[in-house]
Amino acid sequence: MDAQTVSVVVAGLGVSGTAAARGLAGSGERVIVLEAIDGERQRAAAAELAASGIEVRFGEPVLPEGTSLVITSPGWRPDHPLLVAAAEAGIAVIGEVELAWHLRASDGSAAPWLTLTGTNGKTTAVRMLTSILSAAGNRALAAGNVGLPIVEAVREPYDVLAVELSSFQLHWSSSLEPMAAAVLNVAPDHIDWHGSLEEYAAAKARIFENAGIVIYNADDEWSARLAAPYERGPRRVSFTLGVPRPGQLGVVEDLLVDRAFVADPVNEGEELASLADVRPFAPHNVANALAAAALARAYGVPAEAVRRGLADFVPDPHRIAHVARAGDVDYVDDSKATNPHAAAASLAAYPSIVWIAGGQLKGADVDDLVRRAAPRLKGAVLLGADRERIREALARHAVDVPVVEVPGQDTGVMDRVVTEAARLASPGDTVLLAPAGASLDMFASYGARGEAFARAVHRLAEG
C-alpha cells in the first residue's frame, strides 16, 4: 500500500487502539486515530502517538477520505455509524487481534497461539496456562483480552502466546489459526452488544474455525454445541469434571487425568495434578485448570509441568478470594462475578450462604440463577441499580430466604451491606459477594467494588 495516499483508521484511543496505531505506524502505514472523548487522558495519549507521526482527530468520528482499512476497538458495536459507513463503502473492518495475526513475523519464527474464550473464567484459565507453559521452560505470555495488547506481544520473542479472546474481539476476527483453541462455557452475557444469545455464541464459535485442535467443555451445553461441527475435522478434545473417557481430560477421585494427549487414549491415562494443586478450589476453577492443561498438552507440555504450573499459579484478585473470618463466618470476594453464570459458579462452591448481589444486570435473566441457588441461601443483601429484579426473583423462587435491600448509589453503601449480611449470617455460613451484575452503577470497576467489600469486612472484624 502507498503510505502517502492510503490511511488506516483506528477507531478509539483506548489500550488496544493505541497499541494498534503504534503497530501500524511501525509497519509504515499512515494512521489516523478517531476519538470521540476529548479528555485529559486522551490528549496525553494523542501527544505520545504524535511523536510517532500518528494523527489523532477528536470529536464525532467521521470516516476520512482515502481510508482503506478500519481497526475497531473491541467495545465499538457493529451498528456504530462509523463502522456502518465503512461497511457501506466496502472498507474492511477488523479488530486489533486480527491485525496482530497479520503483523506476526512471516519468516516462520512467529510464536504459536493457544487461544481461549468463554463467558466466565477466561482470565483465570489463561493465567493458569501461562504458568504451566512457563513451568515447562517456555518464554510464554498471557495476551489479548488480558495483559499485553496482542499487537505488541507478537513483536516480542516469545515461544508461545496464551491468548484470551472476548466475544467482541472474536466478532472482528476471521483468519486466526491457533495451534489449539478452547471454549470454557457460554451463558447469556453482552446481549445488548450482540443482539441475542445465538449471535453471542456465534462470535465465540469463531475461535474454532481454523484451530488445529478444538477443545471444549463436555459439561457445558453451548461449548459442546459449538464444537460439534468439527467432529470430523480438526482433532477434538474435551474436558469434564467427571471421569474422563478416551479423548478427554477429567477427574478421577482427587486427580486431574489426561486421556487425550497420551499414546493410547483407550487403554491409558496420565496423572497431571491433584485437586489440591488447584487454587482457589471450586468446581468451576477445576474446569479452568483442565482447560488450561488441555491447551498446554496440545503444545506438548509434560505432565509434571502441569502440576508445577498449577501449584505456582497465583489467582488474580476478586475471584472467590477469602477476605476474612469473623464470628466463625467466612467472607468471600467474588466481585468478578459480573453476570449470572459467574455468580452461579460461586454460589455452587459453598453450602450455606448469605449472598450479596446487585449492580447492572445488562439485560440478563436471574430466575434460573436464583432457583438453583435457593437451597444454599441463608439470606440475601441486595444493592445497586437492578437489585429490584433480583428481589423479585428471590420472591418467586426463594420465598423463605430473608432479603434486605440497601438503597443508595454511593460507594459508602458497602459498609451497610456488610453489616446487614453479618446480621443474617450464623457460624459456619459464608458471606459471598457474587453480584451477578456489572459494577459501574456505583463503582469504577469490579475491582473497586471488591476492595470496598474487603475494607468493609475488615472494619467489621476489627470492630
Image: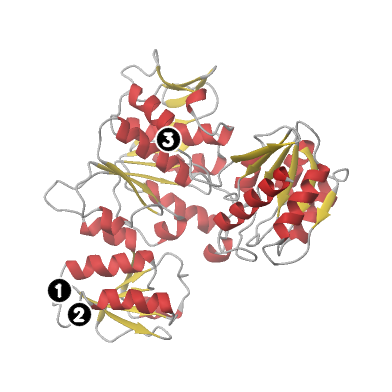
What residue do we see at 88% from left, 43% from top?
400
Q: Is residue 84 visible?
A: no
Judged from the image, the secondary structure of the residue bearing numbered disc 1 is loop
Q: Amino acid at mark 1?
A: Met
The image shows residue 335, relative to residue 377, as above or below, that is below
The residue wearing badge 2 is: 6
Alpha carbons under labels 3 and 2: distance apart: 46 Å
Q: Amino acid at mark 3?
A: Phe
The image shows residue 383, relative to residue 22, as above or below, that is above
What percent of the width, then of the height, locates residue 205? 44, 50
The image shows residue 97, relative to residue 87, as above or below, that is above
What residue do we see at 30% from left, 85% from top?
64
Alpha carbons under labels 1 and 2: distance apart: 7 Å
Q: Nearer the viewer, residue 262 or 229?
A: 262
What residue do we see at 78% from left, 50% from top?
419
What residue do we see at 34% from left, 74% from top?
45
The residue wearing badge 3 is: 313
Image quadrant in which the N terminus is located: bottom left
Mark found first going from the N terminus, 1 or 2: 1
